[in-house]
């Protein structure tokens, strides 16, 4: 055995550098290159752009190399494309050890006690074995002081994994206290192109975004990273199939959070102007269940074969593009439907779903500018599920649509909606900026008072449907109205490898936290600096 391992190491050591690759590793979702691709796609310069993200580096390089040859860009846009292509083509292709440091500070200038501090040192070991397999083994160490009040409403998401701890105390915590705390993170990737880049398999733990809008209803970039086996198969130039089965949990309640997520999505590009997609998901108690491990199996059928123990959802999206002017899109998440008369369909709380519609318009004048107008509605009790008993467990399992206490789908809680206006652009090369306005309306209340609840941890109790009032949005509970105006920018430097992020948000809300008469005004400022050594 030792001789075999030694022989393999010798063989890999003599592989030409050109054959070693990191091309199968992902490009992070916060990279502005995704906005660049979306604008180019709406303008008709990229065909069949998948809504399943993140992309692998080889896919990003391919798109950029195709855009370089096009003559449909301004001089400033060509400079941005060339700079992005150089960044990815200059990345190390063989074994590399990288170290990065990221520091972030957030505060409410109207209340300096709302202070959030994050400091992370990350070490990465990246490389490839041959031209088809890439890996990223990493570990991040954090020194944090957590304060959710320093974020915009519903905008907080943990960047770390697990608990915080401070030497001398020996107590686990969420990091929300008056001193610094240690914690950790790990986002590994193992990625393999089975035949070529059209068939890729991964075992990875990353954030993902599977949707056509700003924030997916089924798997959103705001969701916590999920450790999962996932695959992407390009069945034809106009058909892509993606699947995923991953591990969910929550360290604060480990017994009840022993659950998994399975998701698959098919995307069709029948015409250059039309995008169609259908998907299905299952949140299920951890066990060896082949129905959910098989990507070719319909989850709804599998559940009915093995027993109704799981949380099944279905949905779909379509987008119509009038290049180079605009794109209209619509998405639907169906959590639970009942057979009822149409005059009752939109009133009964048993119908739990979410929907999103929007318009994206590239604007002339500024490089890769994009105006987004979007409306999202999360119906009452959508994403929730009652605690599920299962023969394999002595305790009930919480199979709601959440991971580590945060929504897997859209970031808002049930019984809410959002109007979004977003404008993103490159004001100058190496600077990406966006301006956003959001109106969030969210209702919550007490069922005993004849109100509808609005929390992902408050499921519908099916044994007593008559106890629930009819849905009457804005009138069936205590509704908070929150206005959020945000302006942010990212500055990229290549030498040294440095990113600087800055953001300001103005928040004005009434009935805040669903407390009648509770008003809030916040002036939130955040800055983050990341430097990489490789």
Image (cartoon, rainbow, N blue to C red):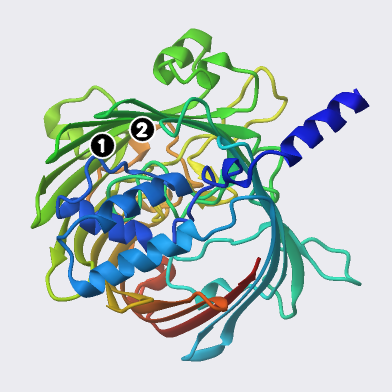
Q: Secondary structure at mark 2?
A: helix
Q: Is residue 114 visible?
A: yes
Disc on res. 465: 2
Is 58 or 310 nearer to us in this picture? 58
Looking at the picture, does residue 20 appear above or below residue 37? above
Image point (41%, 84%), residue name: 522
Q: Circle 1 sits in a helix, a strand or a loop, which is it?
A: loop
Q: Is residue 209 visible?
A: no
Mark 2: few, some, or many residues within 10 Å (few <14, many ≥20)? few
Q: Position of residue 37 (x, y in %)?
A: 29, 55
Residue at image position (43%, 68%) is 513
271 to the left or right of 170: left
Q: Quadrant of the C terminus?
A: bottom right
Q: Nearer the viewer, mark 1 or mark 2?
A: 1
Sooner in the amino-acid sequence: mark 1 or mark 2: 1
Task: Tell me the quarter of the picture where residue 7 sits.
Answer: top right
Per the rendering, the mark at residue 348 is: 1
Q: From the viewer's perspective, is 248 left or right of 153?
A: right
Q: Quadrant of residue 257?
A: top right
Neighbourhood count class around disc 1 (C-alpha, 10 Å): few under 14, some 14–19, many 20 upward: many
The spot of residue 309 in percent (x, y) is: 53, 21
**Up-down: is 167 above or below 395?**
below
Placement of the N terminus among the 4 image quadrants: top right
| In the image, residue 68 above or below residue 424 | above
Q: Depth check: 276 or 10 in front?
A: 10
* Front position in the image: 216 or 296: 296
Q: What percent of the width, then of the height, locates residue 420?
A: 24, 64
Contact (CB < 8 A) between labels 1 and 2? Answer: yes
Separation of residues labelled 1 and 2 (CA atoms)? 9 Å
């Amino acid at each position: 055995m030792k001789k075999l391992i030694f022989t393999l190491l010798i063989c890999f050591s003599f592989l030409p550098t050109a054959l070693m690759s990191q091309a199968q590793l992902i490009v992070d979702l916060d990279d502005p290159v995704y906005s660049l691709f979306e604008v180019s796609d709406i303008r008709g310069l990229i065909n069949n752009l998948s809504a399943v993200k993140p992309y692998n580096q080889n896919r990003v390089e391919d798109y950029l190399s195709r855009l370089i040859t096009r003559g449909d860009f301004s001089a400033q846009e060509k400079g941005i494309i060339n700079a992005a292509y150089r960044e990815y083509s200059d990345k190390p292709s063989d074994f590399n050890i990288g170290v990065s440091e990221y520091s972030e500070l957030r505060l409410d200038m109207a209340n300096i006690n709302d202070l959030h501090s994050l400091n992370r040192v990350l070490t990465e070991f990246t490389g490839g074995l041959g031209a088809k397999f890439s890996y990223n083994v990493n570990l991040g160490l954090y020194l944090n002081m957590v304060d959710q009040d320093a974020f915009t409403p519903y905008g907080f998401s943990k960047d770390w994994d697990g608990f915080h701890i401070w030497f001398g105390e020996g107590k686990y915590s969420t990091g929300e206290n008056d001193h610094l705390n240690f914690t950790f993170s790990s986002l590994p990737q193992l990625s393999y192109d089975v035949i070529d880049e059209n068939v890729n398999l991964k075992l990875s733990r990353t954030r993902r975004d599977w949707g056509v809008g700003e924030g997916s209803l089924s798997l959103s970039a705001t969701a916590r990273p999920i450790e999962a086996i996932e695959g992407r198969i390009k069945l034809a130039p106009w058909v892509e199939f993606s699947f995923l089965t991953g591990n969910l949990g929550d360290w604060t309640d480990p017994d009840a959070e022993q659950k998994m997520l399975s998701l698959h999505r098919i995307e069709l590009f029948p015409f250059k102007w039309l995008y169609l997609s259908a998907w299905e998901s299952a949140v299920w108690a951890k066990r060896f269940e082949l129905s959910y491990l098989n990507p070719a199996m319909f989850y709804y059928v599998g559940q009915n074969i093995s027993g109704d123990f799981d949380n099944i959802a279905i949905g779909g999206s379509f987008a119509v593009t009038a290049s180079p002017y605009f794109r209209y899109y619509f998405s639907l998440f169906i959590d639970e439907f009942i057979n009822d008369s149409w005059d009752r369909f939109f009133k009964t709380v048993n119908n739990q779903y979410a929907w999103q519609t929007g318009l994206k318009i590239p604007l002339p004048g500024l490089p890769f500018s994009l105006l987004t107008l979007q409306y999202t509605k999360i119906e009452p009790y959508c994403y929730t599920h009652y605690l599920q008993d299962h023969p394999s467990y002595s305790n009930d399992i919480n199979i709601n649509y959440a991971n580590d206490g945060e929504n897997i789908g859209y970031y808002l809680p049930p019984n809410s909606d959002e109007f979004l206006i977003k404008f993103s652009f490159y004001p100058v090369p190496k600077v990406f900026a966006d301006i956003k306005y959001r109106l969030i309306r969210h209702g919550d209340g007490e069922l005993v008072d004849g109100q509808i609840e609005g929390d992902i941890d408050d499921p519908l109790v099916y044994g007593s449907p008559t106890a629930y009032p009819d849905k009457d949005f804005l009138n069936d509970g205590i509704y908070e109205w929150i206005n959020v105006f945000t302006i942010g920018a990212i500055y990229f430097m290549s030498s040294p490898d440095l990113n600087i992020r800055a953001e300001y948000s103005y928040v004005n809300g009434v009935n805040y936290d669903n407390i009648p008469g509770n008003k809030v005004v916040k002036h939130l400022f955040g800055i983050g600096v990341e430097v990489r050594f490789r």
